[in-house]
Image (cartoon, helix red, strand yellow):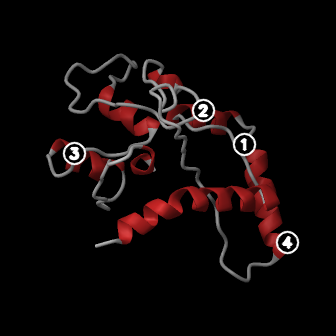
Amino acid sequence: MLQELVPGAKFRFVQIGGGTANYTALTGAQTNATVLSGAEVVKFTRMPDGSENSEAQIKPLAYTGAARFGQLSDLPTMKELGYDMEFCIKSWWFAPKGTPKAAIEGFANALEASTSTDRYQKFLESKGFANLFLGGNDLQQDLQNTWTAIEPVAKLASKK
């Protein structure tokens, strides 16, 4: 998405895997830049007490969320740096095609109820995730919005 914001910017997209694989490729000079979650950046650049790790091998440049990431409050957002870009990946739950509607609704209700538990709140905090639950039409709209945002990047990544 950043490539679309800066005239002349060119990136070669490389699919490596998750955060650890991306970190390894970056620190091993196999890639020049990567995208990591806020929790991964904390893991790779901070000490267990949250203080800065002076021996960290990577430097975060910006956060793509709407507001600064709480555990990295000194890290500016893309918008603060002058780029009109905001993107955060959400986690989605899916059921196999043909799953009865009652089963889907029951599972969705259980998931939504779990979002108010202390255990879940602690999990969100430890991972730096937002507490957002979407279902039904709101979820469908969010999926469409996400696809609209990433489709141009997916097309660029598929070019050889």
Closer to the chain start, of discs 1 and 2, is 1
Write down the residue under mark 1. Answer: 115
Closer to the chain start, of discs 4 and 1, is 4
Q: Quadrant of the rendered structure where residue 40 is?
A: top left
Write down the residue under mark 3. Answer: 32
* Amino acid type, mark 4: Ala
Residue at x 37%, y 34% (from the top left corner) = 41
Q: CA distance from mark 4 to mark 1?
A: 20 Å
Write down the residue under mark 4. Answer: 102
* Amino acid type, mark 1: Thr
Dot 3 alpha-carbon crowd within 10 angstroms: few under 14, some 14 to 19, many 20 or more: few
Dot 4 alpha-carbon crowd within 10 angstroms: few under 14, some 14 to 19, many 20 or more: few
Closer to the chain start, of discs 3 and 2, is 3
Q: CA distance from mark 3 to mark 1?
A: 37 Å
Q: CA distance from mark 1 to mark 2?
A: 10 Å
Closer to the chain start, of discs 2 and 4, is 4
Residue at x 28%, y 29% (from the top left corner) = 59
Q: CA distance from mark 4 to mark 3?
A: 48 Å
Closer to the chain start, of discs 4 and 3, is 3
* Amino acid type, mark 3: Asn
